[in-house]
Amino acid sequence: MIMVRNILIAAAAFALLAGGASAQNEPKGDAKAGATHFQKLGCYSCHGIWGQGTLRDGPRLNPPMPYPALLAQVRTPRYEMPPYTESQISDQAVADIYAYLASIPKAPDPKSIKLLQ
């Protein structure tokens, strides 16, 4: 868990250092297309269908890290994830995946689920 936390901290720092100009150049993502890419590329096999992550394979992606950090991770990943070049997955497809991850509703607070009380 510490390793995952360090990855997320590094990704957030990278996103902050990338500056505001990158936000203006981000492609607008399509959540429906992103869900298709997420399935087709097999992202779900490590990160789970809803980006919830697994203890063994892939870290949690929902809620998503900033788009520039996600793009950097896809292009030059750390640890076990294979790198994806732009010829394998376009920046637009990454933006679509980002939109898909951002569109997934947040899990309810366990305190709000009567059955668990």
Image (tube, helix red, strand yellow):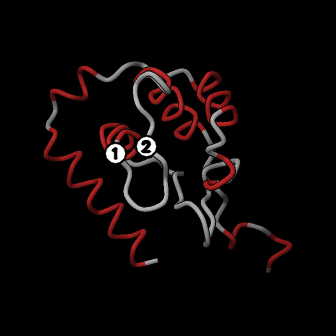
Residue occupying image coordinates x 62% and y 57%: 52
Secondary structure, mark 2, is loop
Q: Quadrant of the C terminus?
A: bottom right
Q: Which residue is mark 2?
A: 83
Looking at the image, is 55 positioned above or below residue 18?
below
Looking at the image, is 113 positioned above or below residue 11?
below
Mark 2 in CB contact with mark 1 (< 8 angstroms): yes
Residue occupying image coordinates x 61% and y 71%: 56
Q: Amino acid at mark 1?
A: Thr
- Say which of 43 and 109 sits in front: 43
* Circle count: 2
Give the image location of residue 62, x and y in percent: 54, 51
The furthest residue to the right = 115
Q: Amino acid at mark 2?
A: Pro
Q: Is residue 75 left or right of residue 112?
A: left
Q: Is residue 63 left or right of residue 36?
A: left
Residue occupying image coordinates x 35% and y 60%: 8
Q: Which residue is mark 1?
A: 76
Q: Quadrant of residue 36?
A: top right
Q: Quadrant of residue 108?
A: bottom right
- Say which of 104 and 88 sits in front: 88
Q: Earlier in the sequence, mark 2 or mark 1?
A: 1
Alpha-carbon distance for marks 2 and 1?
A: 6 Å
Give the image location of residue 113, x and y in percent: 77, 67
Q: Is residue 89 left or right of residue 42?
A: left
- Say which of 75 and 49 sits in front: 75
Give the image location of residue 68, x and y in percent: 30, 38
